[in-house]
Image: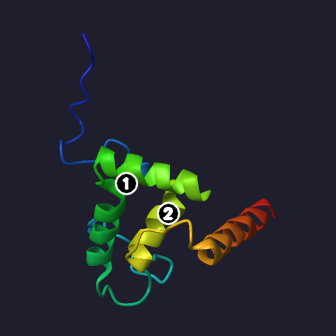
Amino acid sequence: MAEIDIRRSPTEPADPANSAPAGHNGGPPLDDEHTPEWGNGGIGNYFYWKAAHRAAWKNPSPGIVAFRIRKAERLGLTYEEYTLEILERGRHMQVEDVERIAQIKRARAARAVNHRK
């Protein structure tokens, strides 16, 4: 049978060394070291942008994903690059968009070089 510690009250933390001091509500620190997820500025439209980003990237139907993958491969782009172009410019890229495709590929190469450093 397990031994029960009856000296400790149920509201008292099990490990006092890892607990907050008395009167602390367990919230974030109030000093300047803490940065909220939306940054140091005002909250603004942070949660609206976060929801829009989630909706744009996480909810496409399998048919749309397959279509975008085929188009991206045909153009020599990744799915993310092709989808981002649709979201930013509001149009599907065509084979005739040679200049824009070259820009995207140069940006990809630059990111790869910077990532290796």
> Dot 2, how many residues are within 10 Å of its Cα: few (below 14), some (14-19), or many (20+)?
many
Residue 6 position, x and y percent, is 21, 31
Q: In the depicted view, which residue is nearer to us: 116 or 69?
A: 69
- Quarter of the image for residue 104 reads bottom right
**Extreme-top residue of the structure:** 1
Up-down relation of residue 16 to residue 41 (above or below): above
Q: Residue at x 24, y 39 (%)?
A: 8
Residue 27, compared with residue 10, is above or below; it is below
Kindly indicate the quadrant of the structure image that contains residue 100: bottom right
Task: Residue 13: give x, y in percent of width and height.
Answer: 29, 47
Residue 19: which numbered mark, if any?
1
Q: Residue furthest right?
A: 117
Task: Answer yes or no: is residue 88 visible.
Answer: yes
- Label annotation for residue 82: 2
Q: Position of residue 19 (x, y in %)?
A: 37, 54
- At a point 32% along the width and 85% down the height, the residue shown is 43
Q: How many other residues sit within 10 Å of disc 1, few (<14), some (14-19) or many (≥20)?
A: few
Residue at image position (37%, 59%) is 57
Tell me the kind of residue under disc 2.
Answer: Tyr
C-alpha separation, residue under disc 2 versus residue under disc 1: 49 Å
Residue 66 drawn above or below residue 98:
above
Q: Quadrant of the C terminus?
A: bottom right
Mark 2, secondary structure of its residue: helix
Residue lying furthest left: 10
Q: Which mark is residue 49?
A: none
Does 73 sit above or below residue 14?
below
Labels 2, 1: front one: 2
Let me know if residue 36 appears in the view. no
